[in-house]
Image (spheres, rainbow, N blue to C red):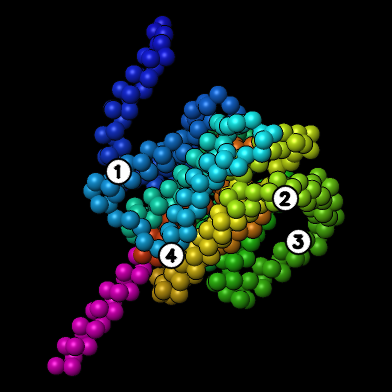
């Protein structure tokens, strides 16, 4: 058995990196597809010496993202241009500033560089998550590529449905946690109501969504983050398709709420109120005691955990809200850039919806799914750290759930660029045609 010294391990890693670099170059054109595939089907992790391992999708984002940044510098790779890119870049800059700012303005009672590893991990996620968006925005050139990403989700959803029916884990490598049901419902329903497909495929898709709907609403009814964002996404998608269909679906959901009112009342209102509702209010109040002293740039990535452990270790509670987390970690300036980014991204997605022709059923299904997912994501961020994982709740390993939102946000930017260029080409062609007719 070969035992490597510390120096030997670094040499071995360097050799592996040198061998892997040509492979990264070759597969870089499929970087987004590979990252999404890894998040769904590859359970590989690298230990960090804590309960927060580095997952495959996070590692691949760093590798492919670093390669893309090098190409930006040396090969003049195309930089994704969109209204959402500027505030996102600002948020990344503020995240770096807040990391060091929080140490400069550190409370004297907090030990220097306390929880340094967790804070560094939090900063890494804040930088790599936007990088995943930029990779998607730069590499996705056609709606067909976005279609392939959604196809992976539908395959994973079908495998997950088989596991639900079997009542046991058949595919241990499969990742269907986090907001997977929300993205599955958003795109699955959009495909059902917008996209023509064979009857057998339509029945299969409807059956799969029904299995998942039962799974999140019956066994998982106590977990609001599991079913409320999918319902929000579903309602937005059917609203885009038809007001009558929206009224029908809303009526069915209301009728189900009436029929199952007693268990719904217990699990949602009574149980969640005492175990989550009141504690969330207390957690936000506790967080404000720290945040109000660091309003400009916040306490830094994962920084408020150091104050919790120092001043009230027995009463520290996670905020379970990305909005509160962003404010606490990056202050008012970071929060301002983050809200600006969300607003610009939402405007971009709705612009694409106006540009897509009513006869382009494939594109309308994709864009409707993006709009539904974006709406569900806005709801989910108020219920937990489902967009930027916090190191002390789902840890940075939660990136394998949260990266989906960033990739699909980048897909929206890419589709916006595609249809913007298409409109310019059509306008130019029409201008040339008018010039020829005038002759």
* Crowd class of label 3 (few under 14; some 14 to 19; many from 20; radius 10 Å): few
For label 3, the residue is 256
Mark 3 touches mark 1? (CB < 8 Å): no
Q: Are marks 4 and 1 in contact (CB under 8 Å)?
A: no
Question: Tag 4 or tag 3, which sits nearer the N-term?
Answer: 4
Is residue 61 left or right of 209 when viewed as pictured? left
**Dot 1 corresponds to which residue?**
70
Q: Position of residue 84 (x, y in %)?
A: 45, 61
**Label 1: element kind:** helix
Residue 136, compared with residue 44, is above or below; it is below
Span highlighted in magenta in the image = 418-439
As drawn, the label of residue 185 is none
- The image shows residue 401 at horizontal and vertical percentages of 55, 44
* Nearest-to-viewer mark from 3 and 4: 4
Query: In terms of sequence position, does the residue under pointer 3 or pointer 1 come before the other?
Result: 1
Give the mark nearer the N terminus: 2 vs 1. Answer: 1
Q: Which residue is painted at 27% across and 40% down in the image?
A: 26
* Residue 288 numbered mark, or none: 2
Label 2 to label 3, Cα distance in Å?
Answer: 38 Å
Residue contact between numbered discs 4 and 2, judged by CB atoms under 8 Å = no
Residue depth check, mark 3 versus mark 1: number of the one nearer the observer: 1
The majority secondary structure of the magenta stretch comes to helix
Q: Residue at x 57, y 74 (%)?
A: 242
The mark lying in front, picked from 4 and 2, is 2
Q: Of discs 2 and 1, which sits in the foreground? A: 2
Secondary structure of the residue carrying tag 2 is: helix
Q: CA distance from mark 3 to mark 4?
A: 41 Å
Looking at the image, which is closer to me, 213 or 342?
Answer: 342
Residue picked out by circle 4:
83
User: Is 430 covered by the magenta stretch?
Assistant: yes
Q: Measuring 34% from the left and 59% from the top, which residue is drawn there?
A: 142
**Mark 2 burial class by Cα count in 10 Å: few <14, some 14-19, many 20+:** some
């Amino acid at each position: 058995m070969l035992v490597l010294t510390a120096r030997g391990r670094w040499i071995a890693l360097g050799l592996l990196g040198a061998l892997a670099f040509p492979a990264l170059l070759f597969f870089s054109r499929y970087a987004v597809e590979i990252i999404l595939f890894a998040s769904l089907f590859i359970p590989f992790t690298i230990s960090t010496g804590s309960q927060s391992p580095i997952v495959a999708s996070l590692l691949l984002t760093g590798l492919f993202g670093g390669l893309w940044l090098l190409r930006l510098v040396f090969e003049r790779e195309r930089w994704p241009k969109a209204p959402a890119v500027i505030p996102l870049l600002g948020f990344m800059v503020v995240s770096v500033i807040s990391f060091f700012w929080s140490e400069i303005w550190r409370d004297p009672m907090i030990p220097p560089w306390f929880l340094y590893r967790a804070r560094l991990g939090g900063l890494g996620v804040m930088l790599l998550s936007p990088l995943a968006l930029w990779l998607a925005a730069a590499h996705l050139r056609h709606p067909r590529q976005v279609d392939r990403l959604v196809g992976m989700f539908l395959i994973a959803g079908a495998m997950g449905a088989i596991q639900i029916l079997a009542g046991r884990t058949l595919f241990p490598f499969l990742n269907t946690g986090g907001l997977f049901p929300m993205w599955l419902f958003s795109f699955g329903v959009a495909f059902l109501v917008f996209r023509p497909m064979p009857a057998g495929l339509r029945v299969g898709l409807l059956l799969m969504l029904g299995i998942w709907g039962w799974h999140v609403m019956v066994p998982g009814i106590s977990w609001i983050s599991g079913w409320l964002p999918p319902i929000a996404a579903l309602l937005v998608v059917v609203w885009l398709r038809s007001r009558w269909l929206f009224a029908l679906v809303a009526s069915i959901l209301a009728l189900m709420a009436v029929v199952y009112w007693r268990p719904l009342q217990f699990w949602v209102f009574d149980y969640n109120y005492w175990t989550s509702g009141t504690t969330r209010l207390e957690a936000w109040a506790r967080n404000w005691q720290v945040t109000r002293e660091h309003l400009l740039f916040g306490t830094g990535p994962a920084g408020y955990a150091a104050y919790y452990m120092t001043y009230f270790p027995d009463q520290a509670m996670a905020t379970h809200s990305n909005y509160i987390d962003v404010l606490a970690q990056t202050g008012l300036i970071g929060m301002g850039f983050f809200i600006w980014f969300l607003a610009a991204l939402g405007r971009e997605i709705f612009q694409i919806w106006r540009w897509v022709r009513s006869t382009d059923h494939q594109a309308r299904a994709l864009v409707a799914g993006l709009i539904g997912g974006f709406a569900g994501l806005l709801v989910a961020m108020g219920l937990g750290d489902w967009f930027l994982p916090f190191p002390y709740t789902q840890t940075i390993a939660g990136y394998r759930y949260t990266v989906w939102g960033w990739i699909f946000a980048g897909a929206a930017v890419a589709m916006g660029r595609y249809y913007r260029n298409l409109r310019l080409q059509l306008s130019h062609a029409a201008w040339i045609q008018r010039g020829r007719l005038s002759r």
